[in-house]
Image (cartoon, coloured by chain):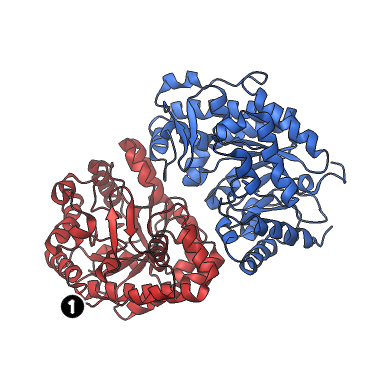
Chain colours: A red, B blue
Amino acid sequence: MHPDQPVFLRACRSLPVERVPVWFMRQAGRSLPEFRALRGTSSVLDAIARPELAAELTLQPVRRYGVDAAILFSDIVTPLAAIGVGVDVVAGRGPVVSRPFRSASDIARLRVPDAAGDLAHVAEAARIVAAELGDAVPLIGFCGGPFTLACYLVEGGASRDFRRTKALMWEEPDLWSQLTRALADIAVEFLQVQVAAGARAVQIFDSWAGLLAPAAYAAHVLPAAGRIFDGLAASGVPRIHFGVGTGEILPLMAAAGADVVGVDWRVPLAGARQRLGTGIAVQGNLDPVACLAPWPVVAAEATAVLDDAGDEPGHIFNLGHGVLPETDPGILAEIVGLVHERRSRDA
Amino acid sequence: MHPDQPVFLRACRSLPVERVPVWFMRQAGRSLPEFRALRGTSSVLDAIARPELAAELTLQPVRRYGVDAAILFSDIVTPLAAIGVGVDVVAGRGPVVSRPFRSASDIARLRVPDAAGDLAHVAEAARIVAAELGDAVPLIGFCGGPFTLACYLVEGGASRDFRRTKALMWEEPDLWSQLTRALADIAVEFLQVQVAAGARAVQIFDSWAGLLAPAAYAAHVLPAAGRIFDGLAASGVPRIHFGVGTGEILPLMAAAGADVVGVDWRVPLAGARQRLGTGIAVQGNLDPVACLAPWPVVAAEATAVLDDAGDEPGHIFNLGHGVLPETDPGILAEIVGLVHERRSRDA
């Protein structure tokens, strides 16, 4: 990798950087007034279906904050919607699947999307963003992980504990394996389309994987997660793996094939690095709720994250989960400044 | 402690036992047909207000399952209701506080309950249960922890991330400290009344404390948690400290003064024991959702918990969180049998 590659890509590879790169999960979101103005009341999936709108929503936070990466405006269920699984994203409720996944006969509904047809709008949005950003700021491709996609499909919507999903996993392990394998194949195609259109890294959001104990994750999710990471290996782009509440499964999330593991706010980054070992970068992990506090508190908490990550290469600053809608964009801008001012000692 | 003390109390003290004791959080709950028949559609707080009903609900699972401990039928918000904080528990929604805690003027609403007046019904229920159980099966007193009580008070109800609560914690640390100190004093009185009436152990449910990173827990919750444990020290009963998603704060939960730390299903018990060190017992930690699977799956998962806890003294078998309402009571009975049949090698 060329030494003048953007800092974000070098940090993903655990290479030395002159400053810590920073971006925010859900930086393209309702916390931004320009996002609310442009999105209006259209549904997420409608916005994603319009490439120029999706591209503009992706670019807004890059312009405002000067973050080191863009992430394609998308949703966990985008690839499911693209193949005609009846799914909507309802404000305040999350994804709602009209006919939840119940039995082997539902596997046939999970075909691999067609790059030129089903995913043309996704490719077009990524192309517009990549052309606009040029070399300086990489675009990250976005995809849901196998457990989280299965959660929405099986449960039919959001849930505190996704008990129906986990029950299926334990009761019908063969069907579960077929389901997560099909979801992995969908994810690979979805991400490859984004990479072909200009994404220079990918993040797999297996947001709810932390609901599983390590043994359950290893037996029932890791094979499908590994299939996604393997499927992206030839692309050569760094691969980020993220979920919340994943303290106990961090090493397994790396073992799936990740270059970077996203860590939620609960796990101090020094401890995460210990669990992950060398060669795996960490991303995170300021508590999104801390961003609602006055600036001196936020500054102290953000500095604690930087201190905790230490000066070794391989840290990408981020929140520990997505930006909350009520977050003041001014606070996020201040965080970018704070992170950028702090120079890494090894560069 | 006398060697013929019940196994549950000996395990709490990390003393050798001839078999692993077992009980289930929310064993007195909607999973039991006799519970549903007796409770009917009355609200939780109404049932708690009727000592004979609360006692009977507490005793039902002991009779059915032969568990090694009873836990007083109660709710996190019981002591708040007892002092006239307007609070209701709404089916499917959880606690709802009519006037949430917002400012220093609300501190005055949090007086310490009066044992003979406000808590007479709680004492009476505990007395009935203790008299019925005799020496063989100890009653566990029940109380919410300071963070979780503050969550419901500040937020006014359930929430995924209790962002308003955490924002108050960061924005107004002095007010937060007063609030959690007041809640600790309420908790101490609430538990002392239960112990005086016959409870032989106590469990502090700080269910949502795992939403905090270790540094935030140490700064903002540990002082109040320690105040509760200190306040109970003279009682001489074992003190259990439980929350979900607490993998990173387990040592802090022990440092509060616990004899036993309850561990959710995410953290393998061998790892929990390592983090806690010797002399602290562990309680847990079968995934409650696993109990919805067919018996061979449940048996394998329960055996894995026992294997993981190992043969050293100081393990109380439980679920990693409360029994789900749709759980088959037959499965829980089978689990009790499985745990009881497995004899500890050191006894």
Viewport quadrant of the C terminus of chain A: bottom left
Image quarter for residue A84?
bottom left
Task: Please tell me in which quadrant of the rendered image residue B205 appears.
Answer: top right
In the depicted structure, whether residue B78 falls above or below residue A24: above
**Residue occupying the point 69% across, 59% down:** B335
Q: How many marks?
A: 1
Is B216 located above or below residue A158 in the figure? above
Residue A274, image x, y percentages = 50, 61
Q: Give the chain of mark 1.
A: A
Residue B161: x and y in percent read 41, 44
A109 or A312: nearer the viewer: A109
Residue B311 found in image quarter? bottom right
Residue at far bottom of view = A234
From the viewer's perspective, is B180 left or right of B334? Answer: left
Residue A258: give x, y in percent of width and height. Answer: 40, 70
Residue pointed to by mark 1: A116
Asked whether, in this view, residue A229 is left or right of residue B144, the answer is left
Q: Residue at x 14, y 66 (%)?
A: A134
Q: Amino acid at mark 1?
A: Ala
Note whether residue B27 is visible.
Answer: no
Going 66% across and 49% down the picture, which residue do you hit? Answer: B24
Q: Is residue B73 left or right of residue A64?
A: right
Mark 1 surroundings within 10 Å by alpha-carbon count, few (fewer than 14), some (14 through 19), many (20 or more): few
